[in-house]
Amino acid sequence: MTQPEIIVCPDASGLARLGAEQFVASASEATAGAGRCAVALAGGSTPKALYALLSSAELRGRLDWPRVHFFWGDERCVPPDHQDSNFRMARETLLDRVPLPAQNIHRMAGEAEPLAAAAAYESELRRFFGVGPPRFDLVLLGLGEDGHTASLFPGSPALEEKQRLAVAVYVDTLRAHRLTLTLPALNAAAHVLFLVAGASKEDIVRKVFGTKAAATQYPAARIEPSNGRLTWLMSADAAGGLPSELPVRRATR
């Protein structure tokens, strides 16, 4: 089992800033070593703040953007210009604001038929990474109040997938299809970084970190990189649910 590093920030703003710093560190290390960096992005308000920081004048110049490749952990089945599109959010807050070649953007085709879109994305992953599981240098993930992460929801058959890297799922509670990376793809990453903010997450944090049995019930608890780092960044109000015996580092800002 991967031993997670847990860092608690005073608030969501501090979390986004520390997340951006970790992004820069992981990407810089990857580009210096392998000549390129592959990142899987997440949707949501906390990553949005992080992306805005990365594209700011303060941080934009610290990365060799033409060497960074962007993928997505999941996507809504909507066109790329739809207001709910994870791709659109990333494009508006980050991708359009940095010197990034078009070929470095590997989006999920949310507008396509879901099964075909998932198969096409798996083909794209295998083309880019070659044989074996994809080795993302950094995967950003969030935590839903029901314990889902990416678009892996509690009880979903996708949680038992062992071979495919990307699948289409139907989420009953949302009455909608989603595209998502699978556990084999996510757990092959060099670094997985969870971003969890808000008092509404305190209860699910308590459950995910509560018992070993949680791993079978909450998808986020099944993120355990087989040969990589696992970091949880939490705002103080979300971290209130952490068991007191867990080792925690507290950020000052």
Image (cartoon, rainbow, N blue to C red):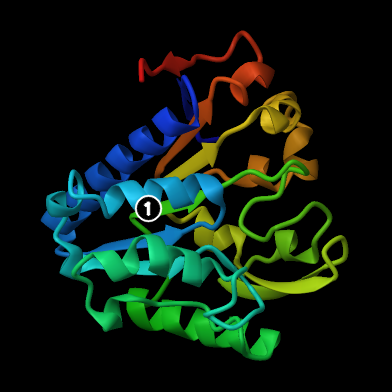
Query: Residue 158 versus residue 253: which sits nearer the camera?
Result: 253
Q: Amino acid at mark 1?
A: Tyr
Q: Residues within 10 Å of mark 1 (few under 14, many from 20)?
A: many
- Of 35 and 149, which appears nearest the observer? 149
Residue found 38% across the figure and 18% down from its top: 251
Q: Where in the figure is residue 22, as x and y percent of width and height?
A: 31, 39
Q: Is residue 209 above or below residue 35?
A: above
Quadrant, the C terminus: top left
Residue at which label 1 appears: 51
- SS label for mark 1: helix
Q: At 27% across and 55% down in the image, what residue appears?
A: 55
Q: Is residue 176 left or right of residue 221?
A: right
Q: Residue furthest top?
A: 244
* Residue 134 can be seen in this image: no
| Total residue callouts | 1
Q: Residue at coordinates 37% horizontally, 53% vertically from top-left?
A: 51
Residue 107's x, y, as percent? 46, 77
Q: Does residue 36 sit above or below 62 in this rendering?
A: below
Q: Is residue 176 above or below residue 213?
A: below
Q: Residue at the spot x=87%, y=60% of the render? A: 173
Work out whether residue 199 can be spotted.
yes
Name the one closer to the observer, 93 or 130.
93
Question: Residue 244 at x, y = what percent?
Answer: 63, 9
Q: Is residue 193 left or right of residue 222?
A: left
Which quadrant would residue 16 be assigned to in this image? Answer: top left
Quadrant for the N terminus, please: top right
| Residue 7 placement (x, y as % from top left) | 45, 24
